Image (tube, grey):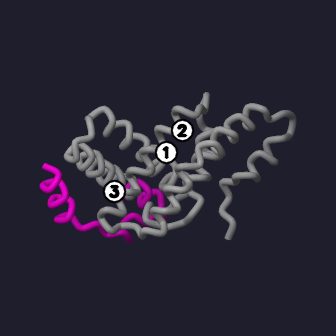
């Protein structure tokens, strides 16, 4: 079954340029492409023997990062090998946009992100150095936990200082 899934994936060409969002129409198109790729990721996990429930958790975690953050908020291609995206997601955006951010939940998202990027690398869609960057960013759990704790400790006008430590703004 795993080989059948791999053969099915290899028969479908992934045009990385098609994943570049631009206009709102592009974003909707890219969102659909990401959804289809995430579904292939889920199917491949299942074909490899990952239980349906675990595959769902991993795919859902990757989905939230890919579609809601990378494509919708950052308006980037999922193949744009830009370091810091996971850090911005887990160390800022997730915290600010979740009613009760917590370590178990962010850990689930990070596991899904990591496995999805391993999937991409396994199909030669990203580079090994970028996969290593993703692995490092996903492993920094103590940092993300400290960001959640420090967010809850903000007083007065302290949000700006908190945000600048792990800003959503890209430094160019």
Q: Establish if 9 lies above or below 68.
A: below
Residue 17, labelled with which disc?
Answer: none
Whether tag 1 and tag 3 are in contact, CB under 8 A, the answer is no
Q: Residues within 10 Å of mark 2 (few under 14, many from 20)?
A: many
- The quadrant of the image that shows the C terminus is bottom right
Tell me which residue sits at (15%, 61%) in the image. Answer: 7
Q: Is residue 94 left or right of residue 19?
A: right
Q: Residues within 10 Å of mark 1 (few under 14, many from 20)?
A: many
Whether tag 2 and tag 1 are in contact, CB under 8 A, the answer is yes
Q: Disc 3 on helix, strand or loop?
A: helix
Q: Establish if 55 lies above or below 13.
A: above
Whether tag 3 and tag 2 are in contact, CB under 8 A, the answer is no
Residue at numbered disc 3: 119
Residue at numbered disc 2: 106
Q: In the rendering, at what x and y percent does residue 38 appear?
A: 33, 50
Q: Is residue 126 left or right of residue 134?
A: left
- Estimate the spatial distance between the alpha carbons at disc 3 and disc 2, rounded to whole Å: 20 Å
Q: In the rendering, at what x and y percent does residue 94 appear?
A: 59, 41
Residue at numbered disc 1: 110
What residue span does the magenta drawing correspond to? 1-29
- Estimate the spatial distance between the alpha carbons at disc 1 and disc 3, rounded to whole Å: 14 Å
Mark 1 or 3 closer to N-term?
Answer: 1
Tell me which residue sits at (66%, 45%) in the image. Answer: 143
Q: Establish if 14 lies above or below 166.
A: below
Q: Residues within 10 Å of mark 3 (few under 14, many from 20)?
A: many
């Amino acid at each position: 079954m795993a080989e059948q899934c791999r053969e099915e994936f290899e028969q479908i060409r992934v045009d990385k340029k098609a994943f570049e969002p631009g206009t709102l129409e592009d974003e909707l198109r890219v969102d659909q492409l990401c959804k289809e790729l995430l579904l292939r990721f889920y199917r491949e996990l299942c074909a490899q023997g990952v239980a349906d429930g675990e595959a769902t958790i991993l795919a859902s975690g990757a989905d939230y990062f890919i579609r809601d953050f990378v494509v919708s908020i950052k308006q980037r291609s999922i193949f744009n090998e830009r370091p810091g995206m996971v850090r911005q997601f887990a160390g800022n955006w997730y915290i600010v946009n979740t009613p009760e951010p917590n370590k178990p939940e962010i850990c689930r998202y990070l596991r899904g992100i990591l496995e999805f990027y391993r999937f991409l690398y396994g199909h030669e869609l990203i580079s090994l150095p970028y996969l290593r960057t993703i692995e490092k960013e996903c492993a920094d759990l103590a940092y993300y936990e400290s960001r959640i704790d420090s967010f809850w400790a903000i007083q007065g006008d302290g949000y700006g200082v908190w945000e600048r430590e792990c800003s959503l703004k890209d430094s160019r």
